[in-house]
Structure formats: structure tokens, C-alpha cells
Image (cartoon, grey):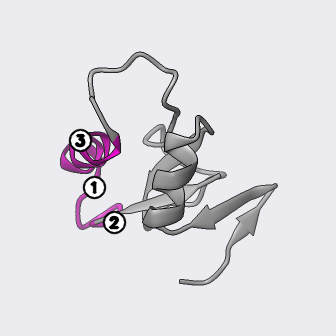
């Protein structure tokens, strides 16, 4: 993975995203073929303090991937902070 930085948003791997999420930082979830500048409305900023329907980071990833990742936008999630 290249270290992509676009307008102050840096791409990180899943392990780093999990650590930052658990520390209360905001993490951008985005299908891997999309650019953070042009997300087609599919990107979401999440953090632990948001009262969502998922109990942990793994459930959040699975839920996001099942609804937003496909062969057109990308089969896995890219994480940005």
C-alpha cells in the first residue's frame, strides 16, 4: 500500500485504523477504488463516540463492506485519517 495523502487525509492500514478508532479518533471508511475527494457519497466518517448500531470495529467493517464494496467501487475498505 502506498502512503496516500490527499488534502490532509492520509491512508492507513486496517490495524492502524482499528487502533485510532478504539482511541476515539475519526476514521474515514471508503471502498478502495474511490478517492477521498470524490466519494460518490459512499464514504463515512466514524468514531467510537458515535452511537451507531455496531458494537465494535470488526462489525462496523463487515456492515460497511457488505453494503458499499463491490467490483465497481472496490472489493475491500480503504481507511483514511
Q: Nearer the viewer, residue 11 or 48?
A: 48
Q: How many marks?
A: 3
Left or right, 60 with respect to 38, comes to left
Q: Residue furthest right?
A: 8
**Secondary structure category for the residue under label 2:** loop
Left or right, 31 with respect to 11, comes to left
Which quadrant of the view contains residue 2? bottom right
Q: Residue furthest bottom?
A: 2
Q: How far is the residue under mark 1 from the one under mark 3?
A: 15 Å
Which residue: 52% across, 33% down?
47
Which residue: 75% across, 62% down?
6
Left or right, 36 with respect to 57, comes to right
| Residue position marked by numbered label 2 in the rendering | 74
| Residue position marked by numbered label 3 in the rendering | 59
Task: Let me know if residue 53 is in the magenta part.
Answer: no
For marks 1 and 2, the one nearer the N-term is: 1
Magenta part of the chain: 57-75
SS majority, magenta: helix
Which quadrant of the view contains residue 12? bottom right
Amino acid at each position: 500500500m502506498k502512503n496516500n495523502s490527499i488534502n490532509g487525509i492520509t491512508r492507513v492500514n486496517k490495524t492502524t485504523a482499528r487502533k485510532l478508532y478504539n482511541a476515539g479518533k475519526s476514521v474515514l471508511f471508503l471502498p478502495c477504488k474511490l478517492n477521498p475527494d470524490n466519494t460518490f457519497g459512499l464514504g463515512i466518517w466514524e468514531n467510537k463516540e458515535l452511537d451507531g448500531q455496531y458494537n465494535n470495529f470488526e462489525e462496523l467493517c463487515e456492515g460497511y463492506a457488505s453494503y458499499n464494496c463491490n467490483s465497481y467501487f472496490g472489493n475491500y475498505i480503504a481507511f483514511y485519517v
